[in-house]
Image (spheres, helix red, strand yellow):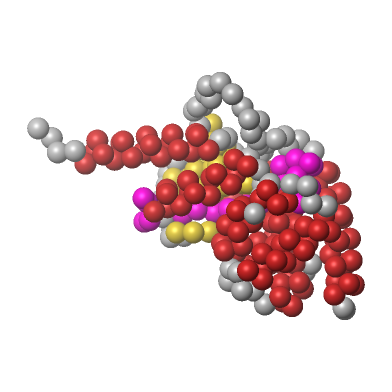
Amino acid sequence: MNKGELKLFLGILAIAIALASVTLYPTFVSSRADNQTGPIVIKDPIKARVTRKDLFPEGAWYKGKKDAPILVVEFADYQCPMCATAVEQMKKILAKHPDEVCYVFHGIQIQATHRNALIMAQAAEAAGLQGKYWEMHEALFKKQRDFVTLPEVDAIDAVTEIAKSIGLDMMRFGADLRGSTATRAQERSGKIAIRAEVQSTPCFFILREDKSTLKLQSLRELVNWFDKLDKGQQAANKPAR
């Protein structure tokens, strides 16, 4: 297959993915208005009816120790601005709790207008097959604005350029991007999101040993939860007078 044929094939694939997303996420809504004004109320986490096995299936991408006492699972859309902000926040959380937190990420499309979210998620999955999932993950969020107005066919070129920049084998990346492994992995994340009733991004789930699954529906809720955890640990470690 020559370069022109490959581009045409991937373009058709991207369009098919976009059309499929309309039926795959019929109840999803935008996370929050990116230009929201006024105070943001931090809600208490709610209990969710999903298990660790549901949220952290075999083969899911994660950072930290797999058996860490706190599991944080994020569902995010690569075209969601607040999700890009969450990248740096999660880095801080993992740096502060290296032995306590295992972090799992699922890339989904939260709304139909984010027409390139799925091909971006598949690009991350394809990069992961070469051991560079997280490098692609971060690069996609850094280049997020470049994808806002791109038609699907041009988005293929954009993720290909990112793949080059992180040193991927380009022949393999092109094959993996349209291959069944990356496609099925992304589709699985979408199905898990539906089962978990994810309706906005970023959306986080926290699981602790012998405790219920908590659902946090904003980045602020996640930050607040860890602030409370840190204060509780500080109080517990404070010597008695």
Q: Which residues are magenta?
A: 96-116
Decide if residue 176 is in sight here: yes
Side (left or right) of 19 relative to 181 = right
Residue drawn at x 50%, y 27% is 42
Q: Nearer the viewer, residue 80 or 106?
A: 80
Q: Nearer the viewer, residue 218 or 25?
A: 218
Image location of residue 19, percent across then percent down: 86, 49
Q: Nearer the viewer, residue 158 or 53?
A: 158
- On whether residue 97 falls in the magenta region, the answer is yes
Residue drawn at x 71%, y 75% is 170
Image location of residue 98, percent across then percent down: 38, 56
> Is 84 situated above or below 45?
below
* Residue 12, quarter of the rendered image: bottom right
Residue drawn at x 45%, y 59% is 64
Q: Quadrant of the C terminus?
A: top left
* Residue lying farthest to the left in this orientation: 241
* Residue 231, quarter of the rendered image: top left
- On whether residue 105 falls in the magenta region, the answer is yes
Side (left or right) of 232 relative to 142 = left
Side (left or right) of 66 relative to 185 = left
Image location of residue 204, percent across then percent down: 55, 42
Image location of residue 202, percent across then percent down: 60, 41
Q: Quadrant of the N terminus?
A: bottom right
